[in-house]
Image (tube, coloured by chain):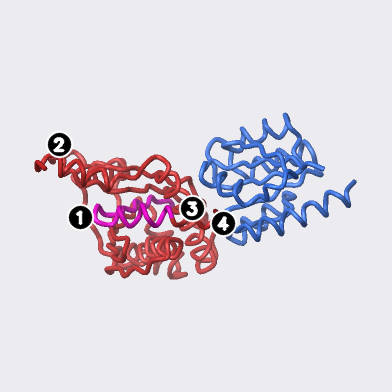
């Protein structure tokens, strides 16, 4: 089964890195957005299975976008990937319903492990 | 080869491409994010981050960038230089109104004690934590080891000066990062520059950073 993944990050480099870390095994269809507001629009359009969200972004930051996504779909699976690993930021993201907070820089191994865990959660849900 | 064509050749080697600027911006984002997390833990405060902005500019344009960053009103400015394979300087700006908040943040002083503290000392301590932390994390991300000068209070800028300096063909990379610390309402701006001499190493290093992802 192909999972739809939405990558929300203002940095084209961060999106490129994340793309490279996602296994190219045909199991994932990837979409991109360049800020929180764009991410919210794309989320509504494509209804992704998994959303990767940065926190520090222009226009609408990741924390606000996460909150808005959760208002639209409380079961949305959103993984925060950020360099901002202050305890308060992590706590706020988890309070808003993030599935997990990943610390940048990410690695192929960490993304592989997170996707496996997310897949497990999605299967339990259904 | 004429002197002119040699200059052009040299200049091209020390210009970051659009893609390299994007990579440097992301590396700075990671470095400043990590430095902020350290700072937040030490100070028991929350650091609000903004998106870093990277520019390539002629060395002679740096005073203009600093003046632009300084904006209106009284300011404290702290400079620090660093050396490694990557070298350059940091310039940290705080509005004068930040002094009391910084004094309490860095010393847990009472209001009276904070007001009595030597102004320079408070801002220098802040510079050491914020700019120094950011450089250390940047060096770590790029697998470099840097040494620093002690932070020093910079001269007040002549904001109205129309003095023009001639272009030098010495290109530097400059990163602007606005930030704020929620406790006591402290805000500031950090400008970090990578020197002309270190740009070729920076280019190689940014390439290596991306190569780890295949």
Write down the chain letter for disc 2: B
Q: Quadrant of residue B7?
A: top left
Q: Is residue A78 left or right of residue B191?
A: right
Residue on which disc 1 sits = B155
- Tag 4 and tag 3 share a subunit: no
Task: Quote the CA–CA distance across marks 1 and 2.
Answer: 17 Å
| Cα gap from disc 4 to disc 1, whole angstroms | 37 Å
Q: Colour of chain B?
A: red
Q: Which chain is blue?
A: A
As measured in the structure, the alpha-carbon distance from the residue carrying label 3 to the one carrying label 1 is: 39 Å
Mark 4: secondary structure: loop
Q: Quadrant of residue B116?
A: bottom left
Figure check: B62 above or below B144: above
Labels 1 & 2 near each other (Cβ < 8 A): no
Q: Which residue is mark 4?
A: A104
Q: Which residue is mark 2?
A: B162
Q: Give the percent coordinates (x, y) of residue B87.
A: 29, 60
Mark nearer the viewer, 3 or 1: 3
The spot of residue B103 in percent (x, y) is: 40, 64
- For the residues tagged 2 and 4, is the chain the same? no
Of marks 4 and 3, the one in the foreground:
3
Mark 4 touches mark 3? (CB < 8 Å): no
Look at the numbered disc 3 and give the secondary structure of its residue: helix
Identify the disc placed on residue B210.
Answer: 3
Left or right, residue A44 beside residue B97: right
Q: Is residue B210 magenta?
A: no
Chain to which the residue tagged by mark 3 belongs: B
Q: Quadrant of residue B100?
A: bottom left
Q: Is label 3 in contact with label 2 (beta carbons under 8 Å)?
A: no
Which residues lie in the magenta part?
Answer: B187-207
Q: Earlier in the sequence, mark 3 or mark 2?
A: 2
């Amino acid at each position: 089964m192909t999972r739809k993944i939405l990558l929300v990050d203002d940095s084209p480099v961060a999106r490129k890195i994340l793309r490279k870390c996602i296994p190219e095994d045909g199991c994932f269809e990837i979409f991109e957005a360049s800020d929180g507001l764009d991410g919210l629009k794309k989320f509504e359009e494509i209804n992704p299975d998994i959303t990767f969200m940065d926190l520090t972004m222009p226009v609408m930051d990741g924390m606000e976008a996460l909150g808005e996504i959760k208002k639209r779909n409380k079961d949305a699976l959103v993984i925060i990937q950020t360099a901002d690993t202050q305890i308060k930021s992590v706590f706020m993201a988890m309070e808003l319903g993030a599935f997990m907070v990943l610390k940048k820089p990410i690695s192929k191994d960490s993304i592989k492990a997170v996707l496996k865990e997310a897949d497990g959660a999605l299967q339990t849900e259904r | 080869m004429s002197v002119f064509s040699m200059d052009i050749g040299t200049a091209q080697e020390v210009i970051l491409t659009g893609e390299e600027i994007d990579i440097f911006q992301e590396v700075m984002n990671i470095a400043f994010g990590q430095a902020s997390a350290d700072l937040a833990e030490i100070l028991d405060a929350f650091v609000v981050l903004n998106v870093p902005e990277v520019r390539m500019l002629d060395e002679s344009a740096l005073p203009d960038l600093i003046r632009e960053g300084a904006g209106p009103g009284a300011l404290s400015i702290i400079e620090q230089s660093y050396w490694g394979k990557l070298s350059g300087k940091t310039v940290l700006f705080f509005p004068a109104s930040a002094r009391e908040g910084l004094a309490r943040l860095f010393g847990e002083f009472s209001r009276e004690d904070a007001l009595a503290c030597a102004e320079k000392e408070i801002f220098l301590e802040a510079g050491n934590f914020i700019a120094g932390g950011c450089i250390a994390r940047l060096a770590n991300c790029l697998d470099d080891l840097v040494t620093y000068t002690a932070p020093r209070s910079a001269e007040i800028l002549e904001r109205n000066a129309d003095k023009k300096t001639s272009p030098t063909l010495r290109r530097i990379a400059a990163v602007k990062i606005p930030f704020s610390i929620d406790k006591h309402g402290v805000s500031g701006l950090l400008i970090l520059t990578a020197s002309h001499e270190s740009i070729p190493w920076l280019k190689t290093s940014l390439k290596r950073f991306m190569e780890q992802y295949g």
